[in-house]
Amino acid sequence: MKNHKFLIIPLLCLMLPASFLLSILFGSVSVGISDICSSILFQKTDSTVYTLITAVRLPRALGGLFAGIGLSVSGVILQTVMNNALASPATIGVNSGSGFAVMLAMLLFPHNVLLIPASAFVGALFTSLAVFALAYLADSSRTTIILAGITISSFLNAGINTIKILDTELSVNLTSFLSGSLSGLTLGRLTFPCLCILTAFFFSLCLGRVLNILGLGDDIARSLGLNVSFTRLLLLTLSSLLAGCVVSYAGLLSFVGLIVPHVCRQLFGNDARFLLPCSALLGGSFVLCCDLLGRLLFRPFELPAGIIMAFIGGPFFLYLLLKKKGGRRVNA
Amino acid sequence: MLEFRNVSVSCGRTPILNSVSVSFPKGCITTLIGPNGCGKTTLLQCLNGVSTVTSGAVFLDGEDYLQLSLRERARRVSFLPQTRTVIPSIPARMLVEHGRFPYLGFSRKKTEKDVRIVEDAMNFTHTFPFAGQSVDTLSGGIRQRVFFAMTLAQDCDYIVLDEPTTYLDPYGQKEFLDMIRELKAQGKTIVLTLHDLNQALQVSDRLIVMKDRAIVAQDTPSKCLESRILEKVFGVTCKQFSDQDRTYYFFQ
């Protein structure tokens, strides 16, 4: 169990830059690698290749990278805070909450770039607190949390659909938004959410040990001197910030936040000090690869990353679930 | 000495305990006994903050315990709760290391001293051979000993154990009580709740008898037997049998 850690971690560290590079080099328009290299190296700012790379592919790759990091880390945190293996930004309705808030913000204040990530964060925080409060009132059983999440999620999705149908001028592609997509990103739109994700990610890395203690259950965590309510609130805020920022530019990417933490639990066990960085590495590569596949599979058509993710992630997740019999149980 | 003075506890808006005063003398084994639902756990949970004290005070060696920070409390009094809401899927050794959390906090690296305390705790509880095994794959008895080792790794002078023998078979219970006696010999103060009256009488220096959310008696086991308070509270009769070593009590 322990030894393969030291093989897989370097592998993950290599996978992330590799998939980042690949998603810059390849895409729906095929460009020669030598063209790309020369236009970047010699700063041919007027060439179409340079524009393609800097204005289209680089933002897209960055967006994918941070979407993966944000959602996977948010998933790890939510699973521990809610003590629930099924928790993730998508399953407990955090994504829908921030999606709804984004739609609302676009409807009320169009053209305000900063307001979108802010409202996404507020929507995410509000939903996760609501789900947690609901589950707590109903005596916090594990199914209750998920049921509450699913209910809130479908309620808010109905809201998203209504807004889109009523306001036809809204510049959002509903299919892409609901399944999660990385097309049409610009660096300007990305800067603020990505900085937030990066900050929240580094902050959460410091909280690995606290997550481990919280994972022991409230009674024991309290006996070990942890301020459980405060820590939980802090972690819910962090995970909402991570998920909300991703939703603000990539829509409701659903599978990453659930699958990536689970795969990492299988590989590395339940120590959050490993889980957090490894989920970030794997999550980033996973989203980048899915997005790349979506661009390449049916060229010149493009499938949103979220759809590819569901195609690959779903069966893989089922495989893991079935294989797991008698194996390592999730700490939740 | 750990002392509760006129402590009242409410759960939500329902008052559970009303103005309870008890004391746990230093270096002694004090056992709380009483029928289910009499408030033993609620009383002890004032110590780890799961129940909230609405009035009164708790003093630890003369200091106001409730004014201490949560971390400071966990360095002075270690508490093993009765229920397990989560059976963690982590190696036993890691669980025991979590007992060092009150000292390590968010970020401090563990030192040789921390490692030594963890290993001592595992050796003391005979759980060292299971160090690498995942806690959720261990049998109930060993699992309980691993949790106990975690409590010991907190390295506190006061050790509070809420029904520690619940998960154990008769031999495991005997072993556990022996460990508790040895901790007392090391100078620790032990507070525990037990359901087995014979065990409580054998192991304790003092008994605190509770009924209907109130303290009925606090005295030595022999005084409690003399006053027949146990028989009244539990509605049973007591028979004594003696051999050359000790006296056994049988309640029916």
Image (spheres, coloured by chain):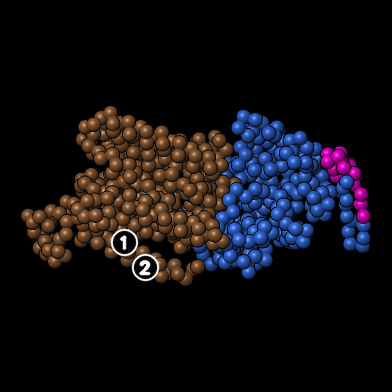
The subunit carrying tag 1 is A
What kind of element bears circle 1? helix
Residue count near mark 2 (Cα–Cα under 10 Å), binned few <14, some 14–19, many ≥20: few
**Where's residue B135, x and y in %?**
59, 60
> Label 1 to label 2, Cα distance in Å?
10 Å
Q: Is residue A303 visible?
A: yes
| Identity of the residue drawn at 26% across and 59% down | A20
Q: Locate residue A230, reporting x and y percent.
A: 48, 42
Residue B198 drawn in magenta: no
Shown in blue, the chain is B
Camera-nearest residue between A188 and A183:
A183
Say which chain tag 2 marks: A
Asked if residue B226 lies in the magenta stretch, the reply is yes
Ranked by sequence position, the earlier of labels 1 and 2 is 2
Q: Residue at x 25, y 30 (%)?
A: A167
Residue drawn 53% across the image and 42% down it: A143
Residue named by callout 2? A10
Three-letter code for the amino acid on which mark 1 is drawn: Leu
Disc 2 is placed on an element classified as helix
Question: As drawn, which residue projects farthest toward the front?
Answer: A298
Q: Nearer the viewer, residue B186 or B239?
A: B239
* Image x and y of residue A53, in percent: 17, 56
The answer to which quarter of the image holds residue A15 is: bottom left
Q: Which residues are magenta?
A: B224-241
Q: Which mark is residue A297?
A: none
User: Hey, what amino acid is under mark 2?
Assistant: Pro
Residue A12 image position (x, y, % from top left): 36, 64
Q: Colour of chain A?
A: brown
Is residue A41 at all visible to an observer of this figure?
Answer: no
Q: Is A118 above or below relative to B180?
A: above
Return the mark for residue A16.
1
1 and 2 marks on the same chain? yes
